[in-house]
Image: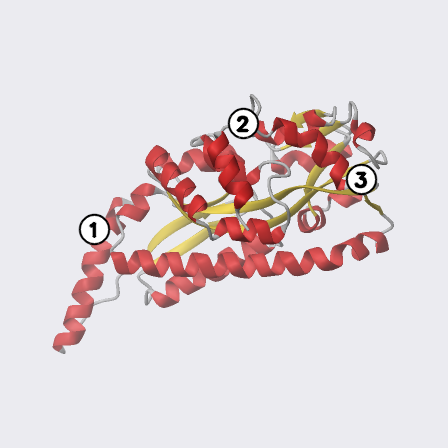
Amino acid sequence: MPTSWKSSALIVAAAVTTAAVLGGPSGPAVAAETLKWAHVYETGSPYHKWAEWAAEEVKKRSDGRYAVEVFPASSLGKEVDINEGLTLGTVDIIYTGQLFAGRSYGPIAIGGSPYMFRDYDHWAAYRDSGLFQEMVGGYRDSTGNEVITLTYYGQRHVTSNKEIKAPDDMNNLKIRVPNAPLYKMFPEAVGANPTPIAFAEVYLALQQGVVDAQENPLPTIQFKKFYEVQDYITLTGHITDALMTIVSGSTWNGLSDDDKALLEGVLKEAAQGATDEIIEAEKSLVAWFRDQGKTVNEVDRAAFRAAVVPLHNGPAATWDQATYDKLQAIQ
């Protein structure tokens, strides 16, 4: 956040309030200080829709003192770039995957790793748990940035131009994954060939045959139109995934307690709104994809899970056994 917001904007706001209380003139209107919110998702996604809603709410609840400008679809950089931007001061707020945040603080990646959660209820309990707050604190200590909340991203499934019914069917499959190391855990467990490609480049990579498959939740497969260049959707549900809403430390630390409460409240409401929308979309999209002529296969997830679980605390793990045991014990 610009230094001016951390000082002059709040001082001006206090002066205006004082003048109003004293019955004096408030003076000419002061331009709102603008926060930049960056993400990699399309304008048609629920994440962008609710970020735009949050921007309007921040403006309204702050009486116009603050403005939020939302930059979608990787317009301020790829996911790695916007994470770095929190420290560089080029962005104030981001959506990001837990495995990208895990590049800065390893243990927090546990929430985005394959077959860590039994189901949505297990994930929701983790989001509201003391363990998650431990992760938030560790990330804060490592980066100075503030994780506000999690937004449900959906269960990740595999799309491909080859039919997949069992783990062996993924052997040597060239599958796109996000550019964070732990996204390779699931493909490698089933013998596939994970290929990191930036989110904005996935459609073209599939269309040109650079990769044969990718993995994402059903709502993402729809709004990114991956189904147009893929024949099969396999309901592996291998990651119960979430996006973190993170505010840069310089921005957060420059806020008064009241303004922190305002921003945190709006961001949490937006996260819940997007979460609810994703849950509803997941309920209807299997039928929708079948209506588009796609083959959607339900599979024995236990077989895929059995291949992955032995790796949970292997060399790729960025958490310790105690953290893993705490997560698994959450009811």
| Three-letter amino acid code of the residue under disc 2 | Ala
Q: Tag 1 or tag 2, which sits nearer the N-term?
A: 1
- Residue that appears at 73% across and 46% down: 225
For label 1, count other residues whose C-alpha is less than 10 Å away and answer few (under 14), some (14-19) or many (20+). few
Q: Is residue 92 above or below residue 12?
A: above
Q: CA–CA distance between discs 1 and 3?
A: 52 Å
| Three-letter amino acid code of the residue under disc 3 | Gln
* Residues at discs 2 and 1 in contact (Cβ within 8 Å): no
Residue 1 visible in the shown view? no
Residue 3's x, y, as percent? Answer: 25, 45
Q: Is residue 5 above or below residue 230?
A: below
Q: CA–CA distance between discs 2 and 1?
A: 42 Å
Residue 123 visible in the shown view? yes
Q: Which residue is mark 1?
A: 7
Residue 114's x, y, as percent? Answer: 63, 36
- Residue that appears at 79% across and 56% down: 288
Side (left or right) of 202 relative to 162:
left
Q: CA–CA distance between discs 2 and 3?
A: 31 Å
